[in-house]
Image (cartoon, rainbow, N blue to C red):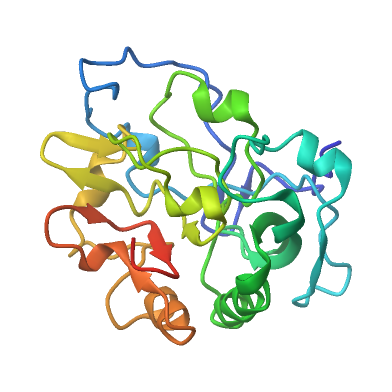
Amino acid sequence: MEHRNPAPIRFGDATAAPSWLGTRALPAGPQGFAEARPTPPELQHRSIITVDYLPPPADGRFHATVRAVPADVLARSSWTENCPIAAADLRYLTVGFRGFDGRAHTGELLANARVADDLVTVFERLFAADFPIERMRISTAAQLNAPSTGDQNTTEVFACRPVRGKKGWSQHAYGLAVDLNPFQNPYHKGKVVLPELATAYLDRSDARPGMAQPREQAVQAFAAIGWKWGGDYRSLKDYMHFSATGG
């Protein structure tokens, strides 16, 4: 059930999502990815009011929990017995985050048990710094495998999938990597941009809220726990990606 805030259409600098968001599938090309496209005007300075799937904190402060993964949560995640990590080695986290609407919200993550407490520390730092996050929710296998709409923006950790364009397991499949605000922080290699409509955010000199930037809040918060940033990669740029192993 969605716990919607009784919000107006506009709250601060944030607005309700365009009615078409997430509904227009893009045709996949020969590499399996859709072609990169110009960012729609509504998303060039993306600032969308968060829809609450979990109850927001009543006191507006940061809260977090770490526990074994409930059976119903595991069932709606992308985990199967074929994944490279056992379910017992994952943890279910709920963490506070600040939305682009300025409000406190509650997100959920699946993560490797050995990094769960460190991730709570990271998101507490981001909350304190008022770093905005649009959406934090566990993806289902169907969502991971669905045709791309090029406008997704879910911050998450665990996703049982291979490395993009390769056969080996991604660090997300081990619960050891975070994708943070993917739309504001796209992946870019050659002609491939993911999400495909996030091309306006390839200009990293145009600093906008929710972007991971060198020497600023998000990069510093992950560096403090020893995690590496995909924005430092040389052969490609993966601005959304932070990982415990550097991969």
**Residue 14 to residue 58: above or below:** above
- The residue drawn where x is 61% and y is 76% is 127
Is 108 situated left or right of 72 in this image? left
Locate residue 63, reporting x and y percent: 79, 74
**Residue 70 to residue 191: above or below:** below
Q: Which quadrant, please, contains the N terminus?
A: top right
Is 158 situated left or right of 237 in this image? right
Residue that lies at the very extreme toward the top in this rendered image: 27
Q: Nearer the viewer, residue 193 or 131?
A: 193
Locate residue 99, reporting x and y percent: 61, 60
**Residue 57's image quarter?**
bottom right
- The residue drawn where x is 29% and y is 21% is 32
Is 202 situated left or right of 181 in this image? left
Locate residue 246, reporting x and y percent: 34, 67
- The residue drawn where x is 34% and y is 60% is 247
Is 240 situated left or right of 221 in this image? left
Q: Nearer the viewer, residue 83 or 58?
A: 83
Locate residue 2, reporting x and y percent: 82, 39
- The residue drawn where x is 21% and y is 61% is 204
Residue 21 visible, this orientation: no
